Image (tube, grey):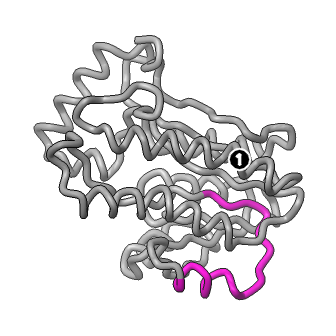
Amino acid sequence: MTNLTGQTILIIGGSSGIGLATAQAAAAAGGIVTIASRSEANLRAAAATIPGASWRVLDTTSDSAVEAFFADGIVWDHVAISAASTKTGPARALPMADAYAAMDSKFWGAFRCARAVTIAPTGSLTLVSGGLAHRPNAGAVLQGAINAAVESLGRGLALELAPTRVNTVCPGLIDTPLLAKQGEAGRAARIATAVQKLPARRVGLAEDVAQAIIMLMGNRFATASTVVIDGGAAIA
């Protein structure tokens, strides 16, 4: 098990889903955890489930908010960025305002934080992409492009920020609150399809992705890597 005892860890997007699971796992590994997201109410509720955690409000879509957040000069040992709120749809049907907002949230949000944060030379930055980067879907063209851009960003930052390590985790279908937004019928249908199709015979949980992120924090030889956690979707 990765030992993060005494190390400072910032989870951006840590109030729900993969981010929350990562924050909980980091705390269990001994880390001193701070979670950040836009909703104070969600942060308060999430922090109550993470022993010793603190929280700070951060809107990653705002240049000034990100710059102010990191102006305190804190040097973090590890940072993970999973914050994103994106609408999806076919390229010809998705309103341009939604398309811009999706890119601003997931890609530019990660970019803003990566350029402003200070991470120890022995530390790490982990980004979160998504399986559509490798297996495009006709109904979610933009999401595939954004996820691919996030992975490319991670590889480039691994060069620019060296020796600080930069990696990306690429989840497949994960049963998180985002999936629940499709409604119970939609969620159940996608899970049933995945159980039939995926070699793992189940959908992923936020904890599965969190384990990969924690591993990358602790592995001093991992950088410029994309770790795929998809239940075998790439070969299904």
Q: Residue farthest to the left?
A: 185
User: Few, some or many C-alpha atoms within 10 Å of disc 1 (few <14, some 14-19, many ≥20)?
Assistant: few
| Residue 20 in sight | no
Helix, strand or loop under label 1 = helix
Say if 47 sits above or below 150 in the image. Answer: below
Residue nearest the viewer, comparing 227 with 91 = 91
Residue nearest the viewer, comparing 28 with 139 = 139
Q: Which residues are magenta?
A: 64-80
Residue 208 image position (x, y, % from top left): 52, 37
Q: Is residue 77 magenta?
A: yes
Which image quarter is the N terminus in? Answer: top right
Residue nearest the viewer, comparing 127 with 94 = 94
Q: Is residue 74 magenta?
A: yes
Residue topped by disc 1: 156
Could you say which quadrant of the image residue 189 lies in?
top left
Q: Residue shown at 40%/57% (left/top)?
A: 103
Could you say which quadrant of the image residue 35 lies in?
bottom right
Q: Residue shown at 80%/74% (left/top)?
A: 75
Q: Residue shown at 77%/80% (left/top)?
A: 74
Q: Residue shown at 79%/64% (left/top)?
A: 77
| Residue 91 in sight | yes
Which image quarter is the C terminus in? Answer: top left
Residue 69 image position (x, y, % from top left): 61, 83
Say if 150 sits above or below 134 in the image. Answer: below
Say if 62 sits above or below 90 in the image. Answer: below
Amino acid on which disc 1 is placed: Gly
Relative to residue 39, is residue 34 drawn left or right? right
